[in-house]
Amino acid sequence: LDRDTYLPSQSVEVSGTVGKSHELPASVVMAFLGTQYTSAVTDNAFAYSIKLSKSIKSGGHVLEFLVNDSYGNSGFASAGFRVESVPTKMVNTLSSNSVRPGEPFTVSVSVYDQADDAMKSVVSITVADSSGAAVLSASNTTGGVTQLSFPTGQKPGRYTLASRALGLAEASPVLVEDFEDASVSFDNKTVVLRNTGNVNYVKQFNITISGTKSYVVEHDVELATGEFFEV
């Protein structure tokens, strides 16, 4: 063989010599992955080129040789070589493509070689907004499950989750949903209403004060994300 290691779709250049003491025809039959290839023996030598499949499995392979001549003589030999794994496909598997801020979601990244066999590697994961600015990042190994969550108040809209490993990259869309929410706290003197969602909080805020007499205090509030109102 012309080398010990090959890539998918490369050709294995086979050559050799056959020891025979007569001039009658002889041939070499090469068997590889269920297919036979025949080469004539000329001047006690032979040569043949076998093109590997683009989807051949990686790892060790064996090429078998059977020599036959016109006298019925035969001989057997074999040669081994390896095929390298070539990263061919990457797949992102998300638990959800639509989430609220603060809501956990997971992603698992798989990388496959030319034979669709899984490959092991470190994977980098980045989530970016429409301008390309990164808002989340993580790393893991292929097949591992990574948990992510957007910060509370993350602006709603479309984001892109991009994974990278072994020279491949794959992008998946993630939608941050509109989420209207607020929290109320009280310290015996002050009532605080805080916008904990990711959109403007526009509502009427009613406070009931009970005692000898009851009072209802009404306020129309409009709070941007993170803003608060005190009474």
Image: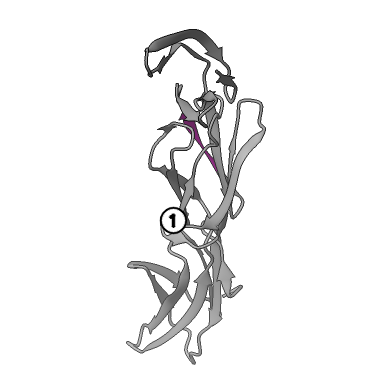
Indicate whether residue 174 is drawn in magenta.
Answer: yes
Where residue 166 appears, x then y in whole percent? 59, 55
For the point 56% across and 40% down, the residue is 162
Q: Nearer the viewer, residue 33 or 29?
A: 33
Indicate whether residue 15 is drawn in magenta.
Answer: no
Where residue 154 appears, x then y in whole percent? 55, 29
For the point 56% across and 25% down, the residue is 155
Task: Specify the farthest residue to the front.
Answer: 212
Residue 144 picture quarter: bottom left
Query: Is disc 1 surrounded by few (<14), some (14 to 19) or many (20+) residues within 10 Å?
Result: some
Is residue 211 positioned above or below 50 on the image?
Answer: above
Residue identifier under label 1: 55
Mark 1, secondary structure of its residue: loop
Quarter of the figure with the C terminus: top right
Task: Specify the farthest residue to the bottom.
Answer: 21
Quarter of the figure with the N terminus: bottom right
For the point 60% across and 22% down, the residue is 227
Residue type, label 1: Ser
Is residue 147 positioned above or below 84 on the image?
Answer: above
Residue 36 picture quarter: bottom left
Q: Nearer the viewer, residue 90 or 52?
A: 90
In the rendered structure, which segment of residues is drawn in magenta?
170-175
Where residue 165 appears, x then y in whole percent? 58, 53
User: Magenta span: helix, strand or loop, mainly?
Assistant: strand
Total residue callouts: 1
Residue 124 visible in the picture: no
Q: Nearer the viewer, residue 128 or 170?
A: 128
Where residue 106 appears, x then y in whole percent? 43, 46
